[in-house]
Amino acid sequence: MQANSSYGVSSVPNSSALSAAKEFAGYFAVSLAGLAVDAVVLLILVSGCGLPVVHSSVVAFMAGLAVVYLCSVKFVFASRRVEQPIVEFFTFAMLGIAGLLLTMLIMHVGTQQLHFDYRWTKIGAAGASFVCNFALRKLVLFSKT
């Protein structure tokens, strides 16, 4: 594509857009790792221990949260707004509450009202939670301003 100053079109990619795309892809990768931990813990608690699905979802979500936080700050986000790691983790976790509540709602509706298998319901809950958590965390914790 040719540069065209009258329309502001350039062949040079916007570096902030590339950075955001790279962070999104990285966050997706670490979220997959967190989801794997989440899914294994959920499977163990429900199928192995016979615990209720919704309660097990909370424990599994928290295990996945720890993995996502550690990998996010180490490998994904270039900018960090909070200097104290304990405050950053607490904020990261509190923002994750939105994803947790969304997960709980989807798990409840999917398994209790629609009678879907909890494993399939978890897939939808994970996708919704991912988008919600990335947007909130990027905006509040990992953006430059």
Image (cartoon, rainbow, N blue to C red):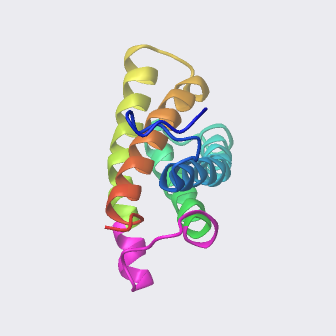
What residue is shown at x 51% (from left), y 34% (from top)? 127
Query: Dividing the image into 4 quarters, which one contains the N terminus?
Result: top right
Q: Quadrant of the C terminus?
A: bottom left
Q: Quadrant of residue 74?
A: bottom right
Q: Residue at x 50, y 45 (%)?
A: 56
- The answer to whether one can see residue 100 in this image is no
Taking the magenta stretch, the answer to whether it contains residue 76 is yes
Please tell me whether residue 24 belongs to the stretch shown in magenta: no
Q: Which residues are magenta?
A: 73-91
Residue 4, given in percent of the width and then of the height, sits at 47, 36
Residue 64 image point, x, y percent? 57, 55
Left or right of 66 in this view: 89: left
Q: How far across and down, in percent of the image, does residue 66 sit?
A: 54, 65
Residue at 42% x, 65% y: name it: 142
In the rendered view, tell whether residue 26 sits above or below residue 91.
above
Q: Is residue 36 visible?
A: yes
Q: Is residue 80 above or below residue 112?
A: below
Q: How many numbered tags mark residues here? A: 0
